[in-house]
Amino acid sequence: DQEDVNNALSIQFGYPVLPVSGKYSNVNLVTLNDPSGIRAEEFRNLRGQLLHQWFDHDRKTLSTLGVEQHEGCSNTIANLAVTFAQLGKRTLLIDGDLRFPEQHNIFNLPRNSGLSTILSGRRNDCLPYQVNALPSLFVLPAGPVPPNPQELIIQPSFKILLAIASDKFDIVLIDTPPAHMSSDAEIIASLVEGAFIVIKQDKTRTDLLEELIERLDINNVTIAGCVLTAH
């Protein structure tokens, strides 16, 4: 059947695919659930642009920013992380959204520990989870939602974590909370090498987007680009 053909091709060409029984419940994780589809190809095109225009210049880290909630920011960076791992890049996806975390839902991971427990000093032995069928992809969930997310992000331990991650991984991607609701995303973007902005068709407000770009410019954040999504 088609699944047998897909598995045979994945072995022959070194391209990991999930068996039907291992499909993720999140339908937006198209790069794993439907790697041959049109939407997955769009994420591969985005990967190609970032490889040549961003990561080809000795950069390893990149965060993603959305203006408001439900603009596809978390889904975009999750699918992008998958495409880098499918290329064989050792990739770490950090859920830096300590307010409305989503990556544990997208990848079906527990959330009893993660970034918040590391930064608060509650656990120092918390390791990222390796994603099923993708040996090159690791995800560090946000962990329990803390009462003081911004105070945790500005801790020196976060910079140390990013430095260690950059040393051990080829690609480090960081998800962030909506920029209009807090300055967490801007702080994280200023701690890494840059950020790309996700906007949603017919939803993202132009005035809020312009304000975000101005604030990023004031904080000397390099903008890698902008992604328009209709999903």
Image (spheres, rainbow, N blue to C red):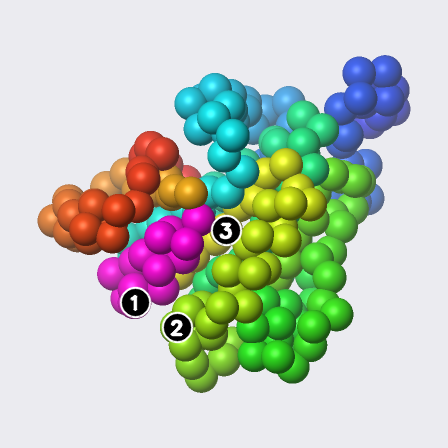
Residue 151 position in % (x across, y down)? 41, 76
Task: Give yes or no for residue 179 being in the magenta stretch.
Answer: yes
The residue carrying mark 1 is 182
Quick check: 30 above or below 215? above
Q: Nearer the viewer, residue 40 or 112?
A: 112
Please tell me how crowded label 2 is: few (under 14), some (14-19), or many (20+) other residues with Cα within 10 Å.
Answer: some
Q: Nearer the viewer, residue 167 or 13?
A: 167
Badge 1 or badge 2: first in the primary sequence: 2
The residue carrying mark 3 is 174
Q: Which residues are magenta?
A: 178-192
> SS at mark 3?
strand
- What type is the residue that disc 1 sits on? Ser
Please tell me how crowded label 1 is: few (under 14), some (14-19), or many (20+) other residues with Cα within 10 Å.
Answer: some
Q: Is residue 117 left or right of residue 52?
A: right
- What type is the residue that disc 2 sits on? Gln
> SS at mark 2?
helix
Quick check: 134 above or below 160? above
- Measure how far apart labels 2 and 3 are at the Cα level: 15 Å
The residue carrying mark 2 is 150
Q: Residue at x 38, y 51 (%)?
A: 189
Query: What number is the disc on residue 38?
Result: none
- Measure how far apart labels 1 and 2 are at the Cα level: 9 Å
Q: Residue at x 73, y 61 (%)?
A: 127
Q: Residue at x 56, y 61 (%)?
A: 160
Q: Residue at x 30, y 64 (%)?
A: 183
Task: Give yes or no for residue 54 being in the magenta stretch.
Answer: no
Task: Look at the numbered discs 1 and 2 and tell me whether their residues touch, using CB distance below 8 Å.
Answer: yes
Quick check: 110 above or below 205? below
- What type is the residue that disc 3 sits on? Ile
